[in-house]
């Protein structure tokens, strides 16, 4: 009887331990959306810190342990994580999240990718060789990703499938309402030109009617050279560009010196909740921060 009881409680504990989906997200934006969908039914680990460059994440050995225990891996896809994730996955030896398994979720699936080159060319160090992977700052893409995550969670945890769909509806309804508000805030700035340090803003620019075609990096992932910066400064003066986007992991001094040479302001932007102060609190809170900081900078108001 005693053995039977131990067996019973053991089984119950094991069941309890499996009740929550064990989710690993490569970046904080994916984790934030997964939290909206998963609610209390999921445990989420995020690999990259929100202030870290998603292309060059510091791969810690502890990540292998997390990946080994994961039921689901959410990755951005389009080669965003190609520089650091594959060796971790090889070390994790987890069939549940191996390529093609139900727990392998590529979040860019179904997203209309921008800047997809005609042919792959990494010869000059271009880290956007499979198209621009920074698609989540367009809220329409956040809806696509949320749907994808809700479907994946539902397949892996059928008992909670309806809850995931309910959470999805709540999130997308909130996002739809916010999008109207955000688009309205950008109305006075249609067509405004902005310079970005790294080319991570084409989806944001397209959504909100901005022109972001000049970059401090000569190519994505290649540090700015003095000659390139001089050319950018010339064009900024010509086009009267007044705002420079700076992500937290990029060199602040370079952005600051270009700003002082041109009379522009540096807008401290992020694509990850918690990446800069004021952007914490989830995907919608981060977008609120972003819309606020950018429209203020365009209006010539210091934050
Ligand atoms: Zn990039």
Image (cartoon, helix red, strand yellow):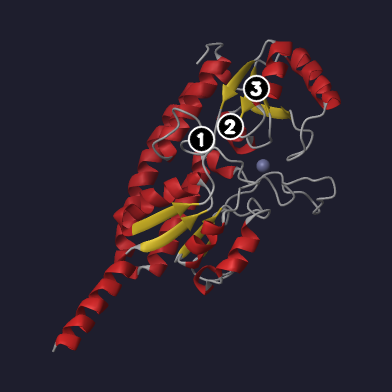
* Of 63 and 108, the residue lying toward us: 63
Classify mark 1: residues with Cα within 10 Å, few (<14), some (14-19) or many (20+): many
Instruction: Identify the element where label 3 is drawn.
Output: strand
Disc assigned to residue 55: none
Query: In the rendering, which numbered label is found on residue 248?
Result: 2
**Mark 2 Cβ inside 8 Å of ligand 1:** no
Q: Are marks 1 and 3 in contact (CB under 8 Å)?
A: no
Q: Position of residue 92 (x, y in %)?
A: 55, 67
Q: Nearer the viewer, mark 3 or mark 2?
A: 2
Examine the image and state in which quarter residue 69 appears.
Answer: bottom left
Residue at the (57%, 16%) spot, across then down? 298
Quadrant that contains the N terminus? bottom left
**Going by the image, does 288 lie left or right of 213?**
left
Determine whether label 1 and label 2 are within 8 Å by CB. yes
Tell which quarter ligand 1 is in: top right
Residue sitting at x 40%, y 68%: 156
Secondary structure found at label 2: loop
Residue pointed to by mark 1 = 275
Residue drawn at point x = 49 percent, y = 44 percent:
29
Q: What whole-number distance in Å separates the C-alpha atoms at marks 1 and 2?
A: 7 Å
Query: For residue 244, which numbered disc appears in the image?
Result: 3
Q: Is residue 275 left or right of residue 249?
A: left
Q: CA distance from mark 3 to mark 2?
A: 13 Å
Residue 179 seen in the figure:
no
Image coordinates for residue 237, horizontal then vertical, percent: 76, 13
Q: Residues within 10 Å of mark 3 (few under 14, many from 20)?
A: many
Q: In the rendered view, would you say 21 is above or below 81?
A: below
Q: Where's residue 192, x and y in %? A: 63, 20
Q: Nearer the viewer, mark 1 or mark 3?
A: 1
**Residue 301 in sight:** yes
């Amino acid at each position: 009887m005693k053995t039977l009881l131990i067996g019973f409680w053991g089984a119950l504990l094991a069941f309890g331990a499996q009740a929550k989906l064990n989710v690993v997200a490569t970046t904080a934006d994916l984790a934030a959306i997964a939290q909206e969908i998963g609610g209390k039914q999921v445990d989420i680990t995020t690999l990259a810190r929100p202030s870290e460059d998603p292309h060059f994440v510091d791969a810690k050995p502890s990540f292998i342990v997390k990946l080994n225990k994961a039921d689901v891996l959410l990755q951005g896809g389009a080669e965003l994580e190609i520089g650091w994730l594959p060796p971790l996955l090889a070390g994790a030896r987890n069939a549940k999240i191996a390529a093609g398994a139900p727990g392998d979720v590529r979040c860019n699936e179904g997203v209309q990718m921008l800047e997809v080159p005609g042919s792959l060319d990494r010869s000059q160090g271009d880290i956007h060789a499979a198209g621009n992977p920074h698609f989540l700052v367009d809220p329409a893409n956040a809806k696509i990703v949320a749907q994808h995550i809700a479907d994946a969670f539902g397949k892996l945890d059928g008992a909670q499938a309806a809850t995931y769909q309910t959470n999805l509806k709540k999130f997308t309804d909130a996002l739809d309402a916010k999008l109207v508000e955000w688009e309205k805030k950008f109305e006075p700035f249609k067509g405004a030109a902005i310079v970005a340090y790294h080319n991570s803003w084409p989806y944001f620019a397209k959504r909100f009617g901005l022109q972001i075609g000049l970059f401090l990096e000569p190519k994505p992932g290649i540090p700015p050279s003095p000659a390139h910066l001089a050319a950018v400064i010339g064009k900024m003066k010509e086009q009267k560009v007044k705002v420079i986007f700076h992500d937290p992991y990029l060199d602040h001094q370079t952005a600051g010196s270009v700003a002082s040479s041109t009379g522009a302001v540096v807008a401290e932007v992020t694509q990850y909740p918690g990446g800069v102060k004021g952007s914490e609190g989830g995907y919608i809170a981060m977008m609120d921060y972003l819309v606020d900081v950018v429209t203020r900078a365009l209006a010539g108001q210091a934050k």
